[in-house]
Image (tube, rainbow, N blue to C red):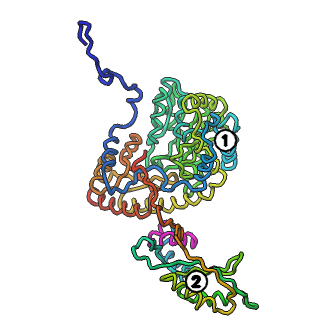
Amino acid sequence: MKKTGQTIKQHPSQSKGLISERTNRLSPSGIRKFFDLLANMEGVISLGVGEPDYATPWHISEAAVKSLEKGYTMYTSNSGIPELRQETVRYLKEKYSIDYDPFGEILMTVGVSEALDLAMRAIINPGAEVIMPDPHYVAYDSCVILAGGEPVMVPTSQENNFEVSAEDIEARITDKTKAILIGYPANPTGAVMSRQKLLDIAGVARRHQLIVISDEIYARLTYGVEHTCFASLPDIRENTILLGGFSKAYAMTGWRIGYAVAPKEIIAAMTKIHQYTIMSAPTPAQVAAIEALKTGEPDVVEMVEDYNRRRKVIVKGFNDIGLPCFEPHGAFYAFPSITCTGMTSEEFSEKLLMEEKVAVVPGSAFGECGEGYVRCCYATSLAEIEEALNRMGRFVKKYGK
Amino acid sequence: MLKDILKILENDARTKSPQIATMTGTPVSEVSKIIEQAEKDRIILKYKTVINWDRLEENGQVWALIEVRVKPEPEVGFDSIAERIARFEQVRSLFLASGTYDLLVVVVGKSERKVADFVSQNLAHIEGVQGTVTHFVLKRYKDDGEILEGGEGVKRQPVIL
């Protein structure tokens, strides 16, 4: 800047610190390059999607369409349409024998994504620590950082089926620790947690008076095992924020509708933030969700059966072509190891994309412990899975050591 | 087990046995055996491809739904008349249904004329047939579970974390 009183106008982006520091901390920069590559390519088989390949069952969509025709386009109550809260609470009672008051202990949100964000903002003070498994869904550490907290990673590995152990969590507790964040069945690994392991974590949480946030968006997508709802474990309800939704079970990803159930004080805090930032979750989505809960069960069962068939094909396929893959019992991801090629996850993904036009997501996008793996979504047609396996088989033959 | 295999084949008749074996967690040899037996037992009647003929320039196919009122025979009821009608090649499907008529016949012919001829010359004369009402299909929207036009589906984002 000149001294004579003449100031040269500087563009804001040229001055330091336009973007908030915590925003700059977010998102692994390496992955951006990969996405840009992918966006400009044709004829790619993508195993990188993260949503069902079904459209929402029509009767669910129709309920929303009808409500629009009737003119239901206004805000709803901040917490969500009372009927939806009641139906959700009833569903949770039926499925997991847990009791929540539809007036005060549940909040309907814009997907589990918003519920997670609200939970963090409601309970995290600056510098508070949240312990979570690594690898993990990308939003987990991001939401903690955005709330001013510090994510603390607990490594998991293929050897223990990517289940996180209570001992490892307990070893990382400090006087700053506020909460434990778990998400099972898991993205990106497809791992599920046994009831016993969850009981152990509940024990740790109680001993150290920590909150447990349990992201159970994939609860309905389990294969050969029963899902244990964290909030249903004995004596842990008062410490639990349970997050759930409709996106994966009913193929309603684009609708943006989910929920959080927790003790009154927490829900009240989350609702406060929600009412200032969102007002209420989208009305047509809430209407659709009511329909889903009332009549969508057979659709869920059929979709899960179908995912299971494809899961078996893809897991066997990876093991057959030389990419060791543990058997995932949840979600719709397989997480094979690619270390036999000597490449990093990113190298593997980029080369595979360029040479064979198959897109997979590098495991490193999900944390340090994801390095050496790639995430492959099998919510895609059998024909595409088969072709992808063919091409990957060729690739592994070429580069496998 | 049989049901799972049938579901898979009904969805895509080209699914190969090794694939079916993986999907159902059954050994390939057993899958082949079950399929063979199902074919013998006439549980699996045919492996077919569902074609949208409307997409061809020269369609050459006319569909008609024909309601047939029948006087049932003593003891055998509708069965022998139904069997008689079913023998005709033009009859694609044949159902006994409740309601204002007895049999619903789906006929596929090369032209309206040919279908009309079939009804007047073959169908109406069968003993026991009291009357027919022929509906010519004007447009097919959905057949065999498949939407004929505009059923392509929406593209998803290639990568979502």
* Residue A387 placement (x, y as % from top left): 37, 63
Q: Quadrant of residue B60?
A: bottom left
* Label 2 to label 1: alpha-carbon separation: 51 Å
Q: Chain of mark 2?
A: B
Kindly identify the amino acid type of the residue bearing the numbered disc 1. Answer: Arg
Kindly identify the amino acid type of the residue bearing the numbered disc 2. Answer: Asp
Query: Between tags 2 and 1, which lies in front?
Result: 1
* Residue A2 placement (x, y as % from top left): 23, 11
Please tell me which residue lies in front, A230 or B142. Answer: B142
In this rendering, position of residue A368 left or right of residue B37: left
Q: Chain of mark 1?
A: A
Q: Is residue B22 magenta?
A: yes
Classify B9 as above or below A216.
below
In this rendering, position of residue A50 left or right of residue A240: left
Q: Is residue A8 magenta?
A: no
Q: Which residue is mark 2?
A: B41
Please, which residue is most extreme toward the right here? B74
Q: Residue at 64% of width from left, 50% of height from top?
A: A291
The stretch in magenta equals: B1-24
* Residue A321 placement (x, y as % from top left): 35, 61
Please tell me which residue lies in front, B55 or A10. Answer: B55
Q: Which mark is residue A366?
A: none
Q: Secondary structure at mark 1?
A: helix
Q: Which residue is mark 1?
A: A85
* Residue A240 placement (x, y as % from top left): 61, 36
> Chief secondary structure of the magenta span?
helix
In this rendering, position of residue A90 left or right of residue B107: right
Classify A81 as above or below B47.
above
Please tell me which residue lies in front, A392 or A174. Answer: A392
Q: Residues within 10 Å of mark 2 (few under 14, many from 20)?
A: few
Q: Residues within 10 Å of mark 1 (few under 14, many from 20)?
A: many
In this rendering, position of residue A200 left or right of residue A132: right
